Amino acid sequence: MKLKEARKNARWSQEAVAGKLGISRPTYQKMEANPGVVTVEDAKKLAKLFEVSVSDIFFSDDDS
């Protein structure tokens, strides 16, 4: 599962997720476009927000 897919499954907008992380929507959008820029701390926050594990979002081999 990709970051964007996790967000959509949770029915969150980019704006809402950005607000929860205390960042701007464009900054969050960059995270979705390039997950390699996500810090470990933000990855943990995102996983908790989406109720999945960090590995589900960032280390999954599922390209669906």
Image (cartoon, rainbow, N blue to C red):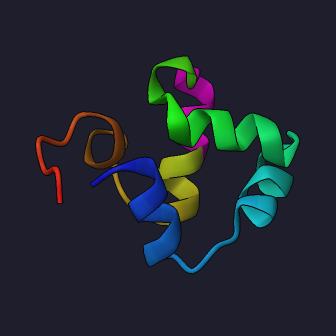
Q: Residue 41 location, x and y as percent?
A: 60, 27
Tell me which residue sits at (35%, 50%) in the image.
2
**Relative side of 29 to 56, left or right:** right
Quadrant where the N terminus lies? bottom left
Q: Residue 27 location, x and y as percent?
A: 77, 34
Quadrant where the C terminus lies? bottom left
Tell me which residue sits at (59%, 34%) in the image.
31
Q: Is residue 64 positioned above or below 25 on the image?
A: below
**Relative side of 34 to 31, left or right:** left
Q: Is residue 22 positioned above or below 17 on the image?
A: above
Q: Is residue 36 positioned above or below 22 on the image?
A: above
Give the magenta range: 39-45
Residue 37 picture quarter = top right
Closer-to-camera residue (33/53): 33
Please, which residue is most extreme toward the left here?
Answer: 61
- For the image, the number of numbered tags is 0
Q: Residue 49 location, x and y as percent?
A: 58, 60
Tell me which residue sits at (78%, 51%) in the image.
18
**Relative side of 36 to 62, left or right:** right
The prevailing secondary structure element of the residues shown in magenta is helix
Is 11 inside the magenta-drawn segment?
no
Closer-to-camera residue (47/4): 4
Q: Is residue 29 positioned above or below 36 on the image?
A: below
Q: Residue 60 location, x and y as percent?
A: 19, 42
**Relative side of 52 to 32, left or right:** left
